[in-house]
Amino acid sequence: MISRHASLTAMALLLSATGMPTTQGQTWTEQFGVEPGELTSTGRNPYFILEPGYRLTLEHAEERLVITVLTDTKVVDGVETRVVEERETKKGVLVEVSRNYYAISKRTNSVYYFGEDTDIYKDGQVVNHKGSWLAGVNGARFGLMIPGTPLVGGRYYEEIAPGAAMDRGQIVSVNDTLTAPAGKYQRVLRVEETSPLERLEREYKRYAPGVGLIQDESLRLVSSGGASR
């Protein structure tokens, strides 16, 4: 079980916690020490804004992804988390809606991921809930979505739901430059995502300081905003 009482520095969170070995001999952090009362459902770090009303819209061709930080909260595994809704459409048709659950550390600004409830649509009807998981259910535990202090080379599990969702993030760069419809961004964080459940899959996401997600594979940011300090 994850210890909620160990005090770790931001670097230790990424590099010193117990990790899961890979076939290449690498390790991925999968235990994160947080102190009682450390996590909250509202806040921000340079690359992730967890404030109600904040919205990101990413598009490519006829595909659109709208990410909205809702006013809703949900207690997951004893922690009050913030609900972030993702709505994906293709050719104007809804294909997926997910309610993702996050909490942020008041001590390190790291954002942790506690699971998601997913609805997959076909012809206007929900056909399955593939990818859904919750920390504290069936052995699942929370993962790290975005560290408060990203370190190049850091490897960590974003999702820890054995057999269901095991996405991992590796920080490839903190100094990318990217041009999207919404503008040109510098000092961009690039994260490579893999999963032991899909060994041939490899995806990339980019996050801009003060904005958040600006690229998810072919999708690029077209608008952001809606929340202020």
Image: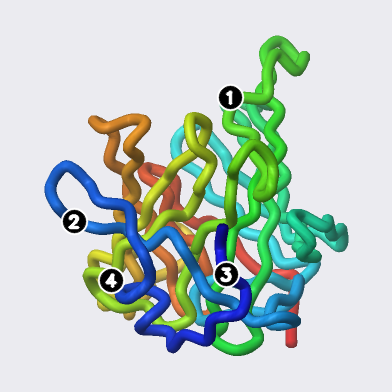
State the SS at label 1: loop
Residue occupying image coordinates x 62% and y 31%? 89
N-terminal-most mark, 3 or 4: 3
User: What numbered label is drawn on residue 3?
Assistant: 3
Residue occupying image coordinates x 42% and y 49%? 216
Query: Dot 2, how many residues are within 10 Å of its Cα: few (below 14), some (14-19), or many (20+)?
Result: few
State the SS at label 3: loop
Task: Tell me if label 2 and label 1 are in contact, CB under 8 Å.
Answer: no
N-terminal-most mark, 1 or 4: 1
**Is the C terminus in the top left, top right, bottom left or bottom right quadrant?**
bottom right
Residue type at mark 4: give it.
Answer: Thr
Can you tell which quarter of the image residue 84 is in? bottom right
Q: In this view of the protein, which residue sits in the foreground, 137 or 74? A: 137
Q: CA distance from mark 4 to mark 2?
A: 28 Å
- Give the residue at mark 2: 26
N-terminal-most mark, 3 or 2: 3
Q: CA distance from mark 2 to mark 1?
A: 41 Å
Residue occupying image coordinates x 68% and y 68%? 103
* Residue 93 visible to the viewer: no
- Give the residue at mark 1: 91
- Give the residue at mark 4: 177
Residue type at mark 2: give it.
Answer: Gln
N-terminal-most mark, 2 or 1: 2
Q: In this view of the protein, which residue sits in the foreground, 84 or 138? A: 138
